[in-house]
Amino acid sequence: MDSKVRVRFAPSPTGGLHLGGVRTVLFNYLFAKHHNGEFILRIEDTDQTRFVPGAEQYIQDTLAWCGLTPNESPLHGGPYGPYRQSERKAIYRQYADTLIAQGNAYYAFDTPEELDAKRKEIPNFQYSRVHRMEMKNSVSLSPEVVDELLKNNTPYVIRIKVPENEEVSLEDVIRGHVSFDTSIVDDKVLLKADGMPTYHLAVVVDDHLMKITHAFRGEEWLPSAPVHVLLWKYLFSLDQMPKWAHLPLILKPDGNGKLSKRDGERLGFPVFAMDWTDPNTNTTTIGFKERGFLPEAFVNLLAMLGWNDGTDKEIYTIEELIAGFSLDRVHKGGAKFDYEKAKWFNAEWIKKMDNEKLAALVKPYFDEAKIEIHEHSYLVKVVGLVKERCHLLPEFITQASFYFQAPTQIDTASIAPKWDAKKSSFFNELAKLYSGKMDAGITTASATELEAEFKELVAKHELKPGELMLPFRIMLVGGKFGPGVFEIVEVIELKDTVARIQHSLQLLS
RNA sequence: GGAGCGUUCGUCUAACGGUUAGGACGCCAGGUUUUCAUCCUGGUAAUACGGGUUCGAUUCCCGUACGCUCUACCA
């Protein structure tokens, strides 16, 4: 590659960033880093009616959470700024004027109402060479009339004048040769009545000015690609045009079609990367972050939706993804999102993650549940003890809260049916044994030691360990779950153990 | 309606003309765990259809079907 790779992610700030968006970011990022290039964030806020306050900040925050930091952005700055299209308004105007001067674009004075009427009148109406002359524009009208309209400040838009019967084609990096007949392409609006460019003009001008070498976007853009190719041809040069790569879509798990926010709500899983609160409706849509996903896992699972390196490997660090990424292994077909597999990725990453780091991430959930943690090192230890049973971060609460406080709910229903005086006296004895040790200044013992001791006592009472283990567990943790009973005793120590036995004994009497 | 794109187990995917079509998630069964989870073992299940090309097609070509995307002064 002769010039430095430069790619861009160009979202419009209209709401939360969904899976597909983040995956587009990821592929941009991986490609850029793999080629030692640069990754740019450009905000496409040319539609003032759809602007949503906070959405841009949200995008920046999401990228930061995922660890996909841009080299240039509205926030980071850079040599090709500004990176917000609303701040580049004047730039686009010049290019639109150039196109007019070339005869490759024209003024159109049709009002929205007139267009609506036309669309109703003619089924499948297209503003193209077929109907161009029936409309009010600088091609159909005489120069005098056009001048008059312009002089009177009649609102107008600028439309591209698509040529007749030409073949426009591009080499898509993922799809190969794609071609279109211009006779079916319509005269898209380039500059709106408010002076803002549409996506079509803005993307071409900015990709050029920002020296973008590879342009990735969702497959939904493919049908409008001929407009962009034409614009490149008219304004700049086809050899400077970035290599296009139209990424496959992420589909809903059931049925077909693009995954939407509503699908997540319907099926009970997040679609946005992070929580998003719509400032207008004040409703919050849940995100992967808040659901308890690790950013490493989130990035990992997204990468596997539409890409693989040809081996059986599925768990990748970001560094491994960067090293292995290549566009020619990106799929053409869309991928249905599977939340079960997503959780599996997260579980794998939880198991893999360092206990210290994990403890820091889990801490807020304990704070929220109002479970007090006296010593951070104790939390680190506990996290290590239970992490292999957690798929999502909030599960640490249910899986580990008993290490910090006595269970509030004791599943006595599972003990009571087989409960009898013999068992009752056994646990009384056990409590007494532990109390005795405490009097001797012993606070805890190893799990193996505790187990041997326990079994000895069981034998003395002429009982079987099997019928005592479950009740003991339930006394300690509240239910039928958790690590080995004696490992728990070792950690929570004798004092709490005795208290929990006595508490349950009371409940059972 | 038109145009473009797509199609391997339920799902994510491997196999770039020759494999008993492989792996992973899920599910089922067994084992470990005197609980649950983890873990281990095994099982389940796929080349949309029809024509070519070829000694041989999941793979290349054509057609059909189905699906998706787009068809806004939204991106």
Image (tube, rainbow, N blue to C red):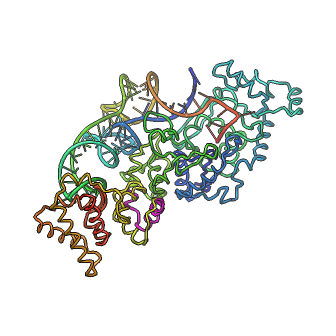
Query: Considering the image in quadrants, where does the N terminus of chain A appear?
Result: bottom right
Determine the residue positioned at 69% across, 18% down. Answer: A121
Observer-nearest of A329 and B33: B33
- Where residue A186 appears, as percent x and y from the top left, is 67, 29
A367 within the magenta span: yes
Residue that protrudes farthest toward the top in the picture: A121
Confirm whether residue A333 shows in the render: no
Identify whether A424 is placed above or below A213.
Answer: below
Determine the residue positioned at 51% across, 42% down. Answer: A174
A465 within the magenta span: no
Please identify the quarter of the rendering in which residue A225 is found.
top right
Query: Considering the image in quadrants, where does the C terminus of chain A appear?
Result: bottom left
Determine the residue positioned at 29% across, 56% down. Answer: A481
Identify whether A404 is placed above or below A184.
Answer: below
Confirm whether residue A360 shows in the render: yes
Determine the residue positioned at 68% across, 46% down. Answer: A45
- Where residue A17 appears, as percent x and y from the top left, is 56, 47
Apparent side of residue A143 relative to residue A448 in the rendered image (left or right):
right
Identify whether A167 is placed above or below A248.
Answer: above
Residue that protrudes farthest toward the front in the picture: A509
Observer-nearest of A404 and A294: A404
Apparent side of residue A440 relative to residue A264 in the rendered image (left or right):
left
Magenta span: chief secondary structure? helix
- Where residue A441 appears, as percent x and y from the top left, is 28, 81
Disc count in the image?
A: 0
- Where residue A311 appears, as percent x and y from the top left, is 37, 51
Residue that protrudes farthest toward the bottom in the picture: A440
User: Start and end of the magenta stretch?
Assistant: A348-368
